Image (cartoon, rainbow, N blue to C red):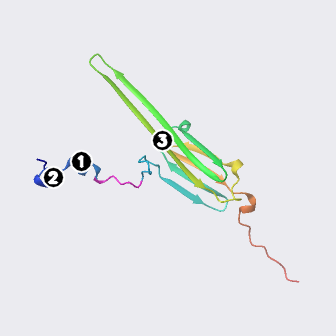
């Protein structure tokens, strides 16, 4: 006979409590976690900030092709602790891939810069001079 959690109301349902605060908002369709991304635009550039703590700059690959910016990362970690009485092996694997379509004819793809610092990948995507807003021009009336 199976018992339901309501059969023992005084005992907390450990698994429900553990998973209750987890949301699926940071999971992709393949149930892998995706880092939070902020995209900002000003008159000179777009800035993409990716929250990815615990990574190294070597873990990232950033490329642009046909006005599509792709940010991906793959990190594998193997730890082994050998002792007289036991051996413990831990494996960790994390990867993600995000793509963003950039506006056509606006981005200067030759001057894109990426830097990773303090758990954040920052990508600066400058705009072409022709895409930047021009100051108002005063036209004299003759």
Instruction: Say whether residue 135 is visible.
Output: yes
Above or below for 58 versus 50: above
Question: Which residue is the extreme one toward the front?
Answer: 1
- Name the foreground residue: 40 vs 135: 40
In the rendered structure, the answer to whether residue 126 lies left or right of residue 27 reads: right
Where residue 58 sits in the image (x, y, percent)? Answer: 55, 36
Q: Earlier in the sequence, mark 2 or mark 1?
A: 2
Label 1 sits on residue: 15
The quarter holding residue 92 reads: top left
Q: Which of marks 2 and 3 is nearer the N terminus?
A: 2
Instruction: Say whether residue 9 is visible.
Output: no
| Numbered disc 1: secondary structure | helix
Magenta segment boundaries in residue numbering: 20-25
| Numbered disc 2: secondary structure | helix
Q: Is the magenta stretch mostly helix, strand or loop?
A: loop
Label 2 sits on residue: 5
Where residue 130 sits in the image (x, y, percent)? Answer: 75, 61
96 inside magenta stretch: no
Above or below for 133 versus 46: below
Residue at (56, 51) in percent of width and height: 99
Q: Which of marks 1 and 3 is nearer the N terminus?
A: 1
- Name the foreground residue: 27 vs 81: 27
Question: Which residue is the extreme one toward the top?
Answer: 84
In the rendered structure, the answer to whether residue 88 lies left or right of residue 36 reads: left
């Amino acid at each position: 006979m199976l018992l339901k959690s309501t059969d023992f109301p005084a005992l907390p349902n450990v698994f429900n409590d553990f998973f209750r605060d987890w949301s699926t908002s940071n999971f992709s369709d393949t149930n892998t976690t995706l880092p939070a991304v902020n995209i900002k635009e000003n008159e000179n550039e777009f800035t993409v900030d990716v929250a990815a703590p615990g990574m190294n700059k070597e873990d990232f690959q950033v490329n642009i092709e046909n006005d599509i910016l792709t940010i991906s990362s793959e990190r594998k970690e193997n730890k082994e602790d050998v002792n007289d009485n036991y051996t413990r092996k831990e494996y960790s694997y994390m990867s993600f891939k995000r793509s963003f379509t950039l506006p056509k004819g606006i981005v200067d793809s030759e001057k894109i810069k990426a830097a990773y610092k303090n758990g954040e990948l920052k990508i600066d995507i400058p705009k072409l001079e022709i895409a930047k807003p021009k100051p108002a021009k005063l036209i004299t009336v003759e």
